[in-house]
Image: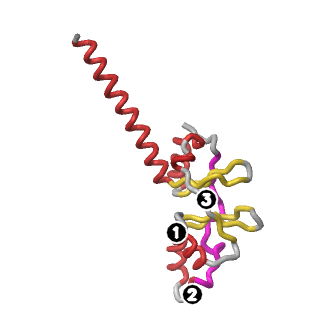
Amino acid sequence: MLLQDILGEAGRRAFTIEEDRNIEEAAKLMADLPTSSLLVIRSKKTTGIITEHDIVRAFKKAGQRPISEMSIPEVMTNKVIVATPQDDLDSSIALMLKADIRHLPVIRGEEIVAMLHLCDLAHYKVEILSSEVRYLEDYVRDLHGAITD
């Protein structure tokens, strides 16, 4: 199954924040929006990603320094791992687990089309596997019925 097949169900809108904002602004934006990550942009180009986890680490790193003085580039992840709608669901889950990330932006060319969260993909995969198990149980039941008749 391809990511494009589930984007409407599992894909979330990707939200952005300008790179010149501070950590406090990023935290407030995440609190106001239905998201736990923001793509960081400069001149309409993605330069990184900042997550709730990054903000928690920033508090520890800040010490006595006010969090409002910390810039987003100080704590964001610079190397953003992305997927395309044509990527496979299973390989995308494996990629996220291997890279130890929970947020996967989906891009089409230069356009960000969605943000996938590992939990959403896992739930979707469980639904697929549950459906397959039910099919196989029905098949075995029918096969058993045919043999005993």
Give the overall secondary structure of the magenta segment: loop
Q: Quadrant of residue 48?
A: bottom right
Residue at 60%, 72% (x, y): give it: 75
Q: Mark 3: few, some, or many residues within 10 Å (few <14, many ≥20)?
A: some
In the rendered image, residue 10 lying in the magenta stretch gets the answer no
Where residue 5 sits in the image (x, y, percent)? Answer: 56, 40
Residue at which label 2 appears: 66
Q: Which residues are magenta?
A: 68-84
Q: Mark 1: few, some, or many residues within 10 Å (few <14, many ≥20)?
A: some
Where residue 100 sits in the image (x, y, percent)? Answer: 52, 56
- Sequence-wise first label, 3 or 1: 3
Q: Say the numbered circle drawn on residue 14.
A: 3
Residue type at the position of mark 2 = Pro
Residue type at the position of mark 1 = Glu
Asked if residue 103 is positioned above or below residue 19 in the image, the reply reads above
Residue at 31%, 23% (x, y): give it: 140
In the rendered image, residue 80 lying in the magenta stretch gets the answer yes
Q: Quadrant of the C terminus?
A: top left
Residue type at the position of mark 3 = Ala
